Image (cartoon, grey):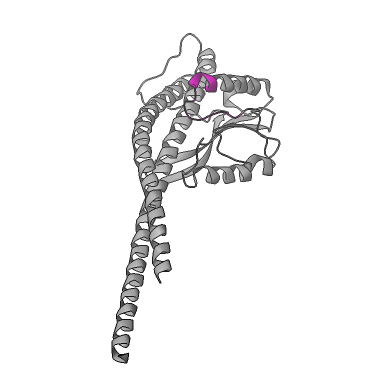
Amino acid sequence: MAKSKAAIKTRIKSINSTKKITGAMELVSSVKFQKQLKSFNMMKAYTSSLEKVLSEVLSGSKDVDSIYLKKNSSNKRFCFVFLSDLGLCGGYNINLLKLLNTEFSKDDELFVIGTNYGSFFKDKELNVVNTEMVNSDGLDPKYLEQVLANALDRFVKGEIGSIECAYTKFVNNVTFEPEINKLLPSSAKAETSRNCEVLIEPNGAELIDSLVPFVVNNALYNRYIQAKTTEQASRRFAMENATDNANELIESLTLEYNQARQAAITQEITEIVSGADAL
């Protein structure tokens, strides 16, 4: 019985150490989440305004036939994929990877940002085009813009038929959904919030051809910011659950330890009484 109590006590001590780690990680993730959420909300408002501007420009240029607004002859899809660099964030990565496996084929091209995907792509028939891993933490917007510029050029030439983005959508603090958005061909519609005719000068076609890539670049960076916000929220949620589970396990083991201790005391008393009766 003494050995059993010692084993239980050792396990309680081990779980307490783990609980301290998960608790600390929860606090760090909470701070990072609040910072990312602030950036995301600001970016969301800016992106919404840009999309409204594009819709109003399209409403004043209804006869313009831009290459960015229609599908070309290629069926090849080019997709930016936003994953995390670190683990311990619940199903954040695996849920998106599962979606990729069902949505894309080996003929499509994936540009993966984030390093925590293990051997997933080696085991699946998916085509990752970047030869070197790209860290998602501290990603330079100019780097993302350069990769997108190359993809836009290939779209114009008809080498790829669409530019898409796979990321984890932030719904609320505890709900996250893997999602794939099509960035090109643009799905923007001609709408206006003004009660007057929209006049475009000097040329609607030139304005659309310069505005659409700008809007797409902003939309892509917006998805990146959202993905990082979701990552921190998911990690905070996972660490919170881990800490709660540790507390429950400690309570259960403490009860088990007390029961073992009480049983040992009862046995000792019984042996003493039995010995006294024998005398």
Residue 66 lies, with reference to residue 14, above or below; the image says: above
Residue at figure coordinates x 58%, y 46% from the top left = 98
Q: Quadrant of the N terminus?
A: bottom left
Residue 196 percent coordinates (x, y):
36, 20
Residue 277 lies, with reference to residue 59, above or below; the image says: below
Residue at figure coordinates x 36%, y 47% from the top left = 20
Residue 159 shows up from this direction:
yes
Residue 172 shows up from this direction:
no
Residue at figure coordinates x 45%, y 13% from the top left = 200
> Farthest residue in the top direction?
202
Q: Is 54 placed left or right of 278 in the picture? A: right
- Residue 257: quarter of image: bottom left
Q: Nearest the camera: 23 or 34?
A: 23
Q: Is 275 placed left or right of 72 in the picture? A: left
Residue 85 percent coordinates (x, y):
51, 35
Q: Nearest the camera: 265 or 199?
A: 265
Is 24 magenta? The answer is no
Residue 266 lies, with reference to residue 181, above or below; the image says: below
Q: Is 197 placed left or right of 119 in the picture? A: left
Residue 90 percent coordinates (x, y):
47, 47
Q: Which residues are magenta?
A: 133-144
- Residue 235: quarter of image: top left
- Residue 199: quarter of image: top left
Is 137 magenta? The answer is yes
SS majority, magenta: loop
